[in-house]
Image: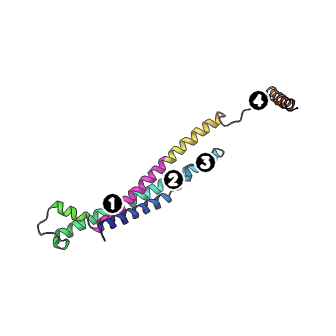
Amino acid sequence: MTKRTKKTKSKKHTKKVKEEIRESLDESVLDVDQNDLDKEFCKQPRLYIKYASELADARMRLDEADATFKTVKATLDGLIRSDPSSYDLPEKITETVITSTIIMQDEYMKAQKKVHSAQYKVNLLFAMTGALDHKRSSLENLVKLHGQNYFSTPRSDSEGRERLEKERSDKVAKKCRKEK
């Protein structure tokens, strides 16, 4: 397989992994129903703990992937040093040659991808918990606005209603006279 084909497959795999991670997040939980603020407030703590727990799990998986990655790197380093000829290297090798050889190995690249995917999931879940913090603030501000009658409909007293009715009937009468 050529280097170009490997890179193309790698990019497609990375894109697929990112899509799977994104799809696992339900962004609709960030929507706010302004007509049900009490229910929204009641759901908020459970939503937050759900995503905060997922973030903690993702951080643990990131730590595990990172440890595996370091182990793979150290193992490859030892194998290359002990038998450089099996990697088509001369007997006398430099640190740069060892490092370059390590990063070209499939095991190294696979372990590195797992670390990157785990880091991506941590980043998205961190963003989600931040968004839930913003939702909480939005809910608090909506409740304040509600308390200030921001969402109320305008009302008029009986005198104002009578005036509006008279204006409407005058307009209708005027329109009827024009049509005759």
Residue 19: image location, x then y, percent: 46, 60
- C-alpha gap between disc 2 and disc 3: 15 Å
Query: Of circles 2 and 3, which is in front?
Result: 3
Cβ–Cβ under 8 Å for marks 2 and 1: no
- C-alpha gap between disc 4 and disc 1: 67 Å
Q: Which residue is mark 4?
A: 156
Q: Which residue is mark 2?
A: 49
Q: Is residue 154 visible?
A: yes
Query: Of circles 4 and 3, which is in front?
Result: 4
Q: Quadrant of residue 173?
A: top right
Q: Is residue 73 left or right of residue 168?
A: left
Q: How many marks?
A: 4
Q: Kindly identify the amino acid type of the residue bearing the numbered disc 3.
A: Glu
Q: Which residue is mark 1?
A: 66
Mark before the other along the chain sequence, 2 or 1: 2
Q: Kindly identify the amino acid type of the residue bearing the numbered disc 2.
A: Ile
Q: Is residue 159 left or right of residue 11?
A: right
- Main structural element of the magenta stretch: helix, strand or loop? helix
**Secondary structure of the residue carrying numbered label 1:** helix
Q: Is residue 52 left or right of residue 71?
A: right
Residue 175: image location, x then y, percent: 83, 31
